[in-house]
Image: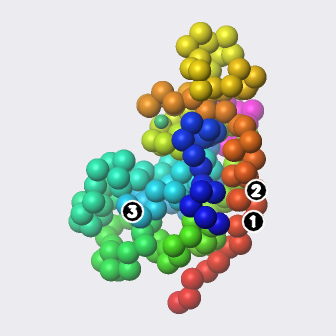
Amino acid sequence: MSDHDGPEEGDRPNANDGSDASGRPNASDRPGAPHDRLLLDAMLGKLATYLRMCGYDTAFALDREVAADDRLRRLAADEHRRLVTRDVALARRARGDEGPRPLLLEPHAVTDQLGQVAAAGYELTLSTRPARCGACNGRLARVDDADATRPTYVPDDQSPTWRCEDCQQWFWTGSHWDRVADTLADVTPDTPDP
Ligand SMILES: [Zn+2]
């Protein structure tokens, strides 16, 4: 998969407040999801978008303006997040830190990274109601169809829609949503070599 297959600006579905009982549970409620609060290093921005679309609370180093290894490790500890990194040396150092063991991802391609994330026990499917903003990890709230503030980049015929409570971007489950679902359906869990 090329870099162009990933989620794009403006057409990023994702969403919902995840709080009512009718839909599927929040990622944080998913049984068996290991350490579902994540912190991804600066090399994993595309992966961050996918994981947010799957409902995981996914902080991203560049969003948080954290680059130095020691600050990343501290942030993971402070927010009880599992560090996910492509940096072998960082993963090795972070193994001694408090909290969940870091997840080292070797591949460059995001589809292969997703395979290793799946192998680590994370369920990678789209929620019926998007929960997290792919752009900033904020929570998404359903928007009333009659909301007069609907921006012009949202197609008129799209419903339901959601809006990020943090960055205010709107989301809907259009064709892009289906493409991401197809990508996730093709993910093959892949355990890295020991
Ligand atoms: Zn946002």
The answer to whether 190 is drawn above or below residue 193 in the figure is: above
N-terminal-most mark, 2 or 3? 3
Tell me the residue that label 1 is attached to: 186
Q: Which residues are magenta?
A: 20-25
Residue 23 highlighted magenta (yes or no)? yes
Question: Is 111 displayed left or right of 179 in the figure?
Answer: left
N-terminal-most mark, 3 or 1? 3
Query: Which residue is rendered at x = 51% and y = 73% of the image?
Result: 108
Rate crowding at label 2 as few (under 14), some (14 to 19) or many (20 or more) other CA atoms within 10 Å.
Answer: few
- Residue 122: quarter of image: bottom right
**Residue type at numbered disc 1:** Asp
Magenta stretch: dominant secondary structure: loop
User: Which of 76 and 100 lies nearest the eye of the viewer?
Assistant: 76
User: For the residues marked 2 and 1, what is the alpha-carbon distance in whole angstroms?
Assistant: 6 Å
Question: Is residue 17 visible from the viewing direction of this image?
Answer: no
Tell me the residue that label 3 is attached to: 41
User: For the residues marked 3 and 1, what is the alpha-carbon distance in whole angstroms?
Assistant: 24 Å
Query: Which residue is rendered at x = 30% and y = 64% of the image?
Result: 73
Q: Is mark 1 within 8 Å of ligand 1?
A: no
